[in-house]
Amino acid sequence: MSEVVSIKNLKKTYKSGIENLEVLQNVCLDVNGGETVVITGESGSGKSTLLNLIGGLDNATEGVIVVDGRDICRLNENELTDYRNRYIGFIFQFHYLLNDFNALENVLIPALIRGDRYDSAESRALTLLSDVGLKEHRHHYPSELSGGERQRIAVARALMNEPPLILADEPLGNLDERNSRVVEDILFSLVEKYRKTMVLVTHDPELAGRSDKYYKLGHGLLERA
Ligand code: ADP
Ligand code: MG
C-alpha cells in the first residue's frame, strides 16, 4: 500500500529566551494507507508538537513532511487552510465543538467550509451521527451532551470531509474509564470501516495494543516499540 505520511529527518526547535528547546531532534516516520499508528511518550516529549507539524498547524525547523504526496512544508497559508480542511481529520483532547451550533451543524460545518451543498452535507452528517450512535441527539447543543457524547460528535466531525488522514491527540484524555472505552471503540471501528489512516498520540500505553504500528517518542527521537 502507498504511503500516506512520509517524514524524513524532522526537527523542531522552540526558541525560549536565550535557550533553544530541541523538542524533535531527528524524527522519521512512514505510515501506509489504512494503517493505525499509536505514538506514546511522556508528557512534554513532543507528541502534540509532532502531530501539529503533520497537521500543518505549526512549522518544522528542518526536515520533510509529505502527506498524500504533497510536501506540506512548502504550502502557503491558503494552501495549508485547504490542506487542513480536506486532508486531515483532527480529534483533540478537548472537543472544540462550537457552542452555538447543535450536534448536526457541528458535524457538517467542515463540509460547508469546503463548499458542499447543505443537503448533501446534511445527509452525510446524519450517517456519521448514526455511526457514533447519536442520531437522536442531532438537535442537542454541546452543553446538552455529556463529555463522552461531545467527543463522539468530534469523531464524526473529523470524518465529515472524508480526509485520508485522522490525527488524534489524546482523544480519550478528558474522559472517565467507561467513556474512554466507548469512544475508543467507536474511533477505531470507524477508522477501519472508512479505511482511514490514523496517527494517534497518547501518554496511555494501553492504546498501543490497538495499533498496527507502535512507536515511542522520547529525547527528541521516535523509536518503533
Ligand atoms: P506532549 O504533547 O508530548 O506533552 P508537547 O509537544 O506539547 O508535548 O511539548 C513538548 C515540549 O515543547 C514541552 O517542553 C513544551 O513546553 C514545549 N513547547 C510546546 N509548544 C511550545 C511553544 N509554542 N513554544 C515553546 N515551547 C513549546
Ligand atoms: Mg500533548
Image (spheres, rainbow, N blue to C red):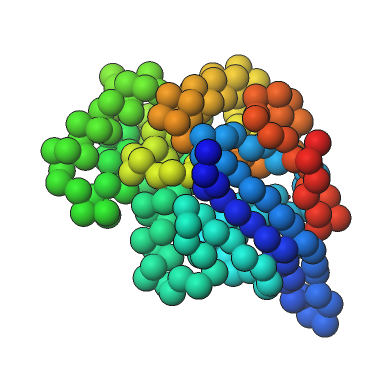
Q: Position of residue 224 (x, y in %)?
A: 78, 41
Q: Looking at the image, which residue is at 28% across and 26% down?
A: 127
| Residue 50 visible in rendering | yes
Q: Nearest the camera: 197 or 136? A: 197
At a point 45% along the width and 49% down the height, the residue shown is 88
Q: Tell me where residue 116 appears, x and y as whole percent.
A: 19, 48
Residue 17 is drawn in which quadrant? bottom right
Identify whether 99 is placed above or below 57: above
Q: Nearer the viewer, residue 13 or 3?
A: 3
* Vertical side of 67 occupied by 101: above or below: above
**122 versus 92 height, above or below:** above
The image quarter containing residue 182 is: top right
Quarter of the C terminus within the rendering: top right
**Which residue appears at 68% of the width and 50% of the height?**
29
Q: Is residue 178 left or right of residue 136?
A: right
- Image position, residue 94 (x, y; %): 54, 42
Task: Please identify the residue farthest to the bottom as the structure is shown.
Answer: 18
Q: Is residue 174 visible?
A: no
Q: Position of residue 98 (x, y in %)?
A: 37, 46
Residues 188 and 178: in front is 188
215 lies left or right of 31: right
* In this view, 10 is above or below 140: below
Q: Give the quadrant of residue 73.
A: bottom right
Horizontal relation, residue 30 to residue 166: left or right: right
**Count of marks placed on residues:** 0
